Image: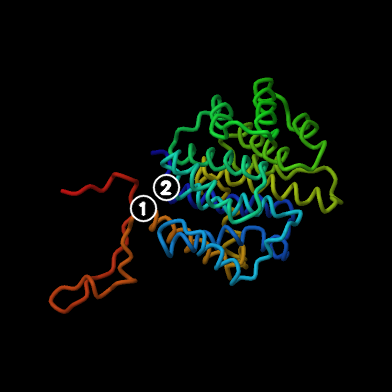
Amino acid sequence: MRYSPISRFRGTLLGAFLGGSLATGDLKSQNYLDLGRMAVIGTESLIALGRLDLDDWIARQQKESLDLAATDDIPIKIILATLPIALFFHENPIKLRQNLLHVLKIWEDDPVVRDGTLAVGYAIALALTEKLNPLTLIPQTISFIGQTPTSIPKKLLIVQNLLEQGAGLSRAQAEFAKEEKLSNTIAMAFYCFLSTLEDFRLAVLQATHNGNFKMQHATLLSSQATGAITGALSGAYNGISGIPVNWQVSLWQRNSPTWGLTSFSQMLELIDAFVAVWSGVYNLALNPTELTEEGYEVALLSVYAAPRVIRSR
């Protein structure tokens, strides 16, 4: 295994956070702090229950008073909110598709959001299972999406052609910047990821590059969305070790609020707990009295391993 599951889980969620933040340059802006809050809530629900429960997701969102009404940024918030599902069910394509479609029932049905969610979730799943082949990713993703009236498959085929022709960033931007559409955002994110497959830094810098520094609100949202999706894809593929060390150190030093959490370190703790639940690690801290020896509590230990590595004797 090239990278451990915990490295890829961290890379996916931190990659999405960093990718979106580069578009704003302001980690403290309220708009950006709220961008991935639904992803955090979904992660907390999966940790607490060990399974997907829509009622619990909805109850947690209502408790946080999150506005689910239609706004300009709700499509990208929904796609980011499904990242924990892509991670939790990445080993089984059938369950992955079923649960991605199931969780989308929380929000208003939008075919473009649905197809974008399936495309991003499937690519992340392939990265985590180390089955992602850049030459076949787009055809496989289109097949995973299935029959659809949206333009996302067509846009992904354009990405494939651009990559085969060795087209540069400016040509890709000209192709997908004609309209501020989610389908163009998804396509641009796939281009930035696949054109710089082994370089997280370059991928997200491409995704957030815009020569117009006085961006309008719609353009800024599009740049945030492209950066966040690109960061998630590249982070899943390259793991947390692919994220520049100076970027990680900067987050540690600031330790500022992250997607509704109080600090960056709290986000890392949440991801580690998420990996533990996914891998089936028993949390002794929650049930310390169940493991005792002659009246003495056994020292609490945490064990991490790749799936199917630890076996019964």
Seen from the viewer's position, the closer of residues 22 and 187 is 187
- Tag 2: Cα neighbours inside 10 Å, few (<14), some, or many (≥20)? many
Q: Amino acid at mark 1?
A: Ser
- Number of numbered labels in the structure image: 2
Circle 1 — which element? helix
| Image-based side of 116 in relation to 180, left or right | left
In this picture, is 224 found above or below 154?
below
Residue under pointer 1: 279
Mark 2 belongs to which amino acid? Pro
Q: Position of residue 61 (x, y in %)?
A: 59, 66
Q: Position of residue 127 (x, y in %)?
A: 49, 38
| Foreground label between 1 and 2 | 1
Q: Where residue 179 sits in the image (x, y, percent)?
A: 81, 39
Q: Residue furthest top?
A: 165
Q: Residue at x 52, y 66 (%)?
A: 266
Q: Quadrant of residue 73?
A: bottom right
Residue occupying the far left of the picture: 294
Left or right of 13 in this view: 287: left
**Which residue is at a point 73% across and 60% down the rendered structure image?**
26
Camera-side residue of 47 and 107: 107
User: Colour mode?
Assistant: rainbow
Helix, strand or loop at mark 2: helix
Asked whether the beta carbons under mark 1 and mark 2 sit within 8 Å of each other, the answer is: yes
Q: Which mark is residue 128?
A: none
Placement of the N terminus among the 4 image quadrants: top left
Residue at position x 53%, y 47% in the image: 100
Mark 1 or 2, nearer chain start: 2
User: What separation in Å lies between label 1 and label 2 (alpha carbons)?
Assistant: 9 Å
| Residue that carries the numbered disc 2 in the rendered image | 5
Instruction: Identify the residue at image location x=56%, y=51%.
Output: 82
Q: Residues within 10 Å of mark 1 (few under 14, many from 20)?
A: some
- Quarter of the figure with residue 74: bottom right
